Image (cartoon, rainbow, N blue to C red):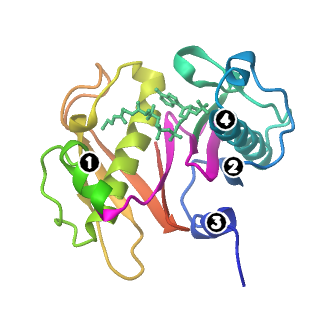
């Protein structure tokens, strides 16, 4: 039976440990639009309009799933961050085909980040590995290079997206390193991230985070929260 990529990702992530009261939703890019696009997005290329719209539909559905009563579509806040309802945290991610949103009440989490990435080709993996892996050699995890690079990239982006709303500071890919917690059949896909430099006063070098990943429909989905 043919399943849509969004259904495959929803299935693969259904046992992911979400923040208390959290909701995670995947939607197809290019589906219907149930709200007016902001003026700044209406001036963008059709592809950007489509990914923005799908991300906002995922956000609205995730808020609904998590029990937020108002079912709002978040606007655009400072630094391009979504303008989440008071008392809520959230994160949006989109590839060309899939958008996703993770939300939770701020009573259950201090920070959260979501990233969804299409798995890169081996050629792209070789090109981007030096930057993404920050000089560490490929193959330490025993995974195919394209998966190791995509998982590393996605974990670092989820970390950045979780911390940026608190720190408001840019950090490049050398600012954290990943460690693989386990691999093999039944792999829970846990990744440990360690900051290699201070990300502000509250987040000194050496601070560790754990991200959880799932692989489905040619994508890696990463969530990170605490
Ligand atoms: C900001 C960034 C992480 C977005 O990642 P991406 O893979 O391009 O895009 P995604 O689809 O996953 O996420 C885009 C969404 O993230 C949100 N977003 C944008 N900037 C953000 C930020 N600084 N922090 C958190 N979320 C952000 C927005 O909701 C955006 O979607 P929208 O514009 O439609 O609302 C990326 O562009 C970036 O700057 N990366 C470099 C920094 C980094 O990752 N460092 C690694 C440190 S170890």
Task: Please give the name of the residue rendered at 28% of the width and 71% of the height, measured from the top-left corner.
Answer: 144
Residue 134: percent from left, percent from top: 17, 43
Quarter of the N terminus within the rendering: bottom right
Residue 42 located within the stretch drawn in magenta:
no
- Left or right of 124? Residue 83 is right
Give the SS element for disc 1: helix
Upstream in sequence: badge 4 or badge 2: 2
Upstream in sequence: badge 2 or badge 3: 3
Q: CA distance from mark 4 to mark 1?
A: 25 Å
Q: CA distance from mark 3 to mark 4?
A: 18 Å
Task: Please give the name of the residue rendered at 64% of the width and 65% of the height, measured from the top-left corner.
Answer: 5
- Left or right of 153? Residue 179 is left
Task: Please give the name of the residue rendered at 43% of the width and 26% of the height, measured from the top-left corner.
Answer: 164
Q: CA distance from mark 2 to mark 3?
A: 11 Å
Q: Examine the rendered structure and indicate whether residue 6 appears above or below residue 131.
A: below
Image: magenta residue range: 93-122
Residues marked 2 and 3 touching at CB (< 8 Å): no
Q: Is mark 2 within 8 Å of ligand 1?
A: no
Residue under pointer 3: 5
Residue under pointer 4: 52
Mark on residue 29?
2
Q: CA distance from mark 4 to mark 2?
A: 9 Å
Residues marked 1 and 2 touching at CB (< 8 Å): no
- Left or right of 50? Residue 226 is left
Upstream in sequence: badge 3 or badge 4: 3
Residue 101 located within the stretch drawn in magenta:
yes
Residue under pointer 1: 128
Which one is nearer the viewer's eye here, 35 or 182? 35
Give the SS element for disc 2: loop
Which one is nearer the viewer's eye here, 102 or 225? 102
Upstream in sequence: badge 4 or badge 1: 4
């Amino acid at each position: 039976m043919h399943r849509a990529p969004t259904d495959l990702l929803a299935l693969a992530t259904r046992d992911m440990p979400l923040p208390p009261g959290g909701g995670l939703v995947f939607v197809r890019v290019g589906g219907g639009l149930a709200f007016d696009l902001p003026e700044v997005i209406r001036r963008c290329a059709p592809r950007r309009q489509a990914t923005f719209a799908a991300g906002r539909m995922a956000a609205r559905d995730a808020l609904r799933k998590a029990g937020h009563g108002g079912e709002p579509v978040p606007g655009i806040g400072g630094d391009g961050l979504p303008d989440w309802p008071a008392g809520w945290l959230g994160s949006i991610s989109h590839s060309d085909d899939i958008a996703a949103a993770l939300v939770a009440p701020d009573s259950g989490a201090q920070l959260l980040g979501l990233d969804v990435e299409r798995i890169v080709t081996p050629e792209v993996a070789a090109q981007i590995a030096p930057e993404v892996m920050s000089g560490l050699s490929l193959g330490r995890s025993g995974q195919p290079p394209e998966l190791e690079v995509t998982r590393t990239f996605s974990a670092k982006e989820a970390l950045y997206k979780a911390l940026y709303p608190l720190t408001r500071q840019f950090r490049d890919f050398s600012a954290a390193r990943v460690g693989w917690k386990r691999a093999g059949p039944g792999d829970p896909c846990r990744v440990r991230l360690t900051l290699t430099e201070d990300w502000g006063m509250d987040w000194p070098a050496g601070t560790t985070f754990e991200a959880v990943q799932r692989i489905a429909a040619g994508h890696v989905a990463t969530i990170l929260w605490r």
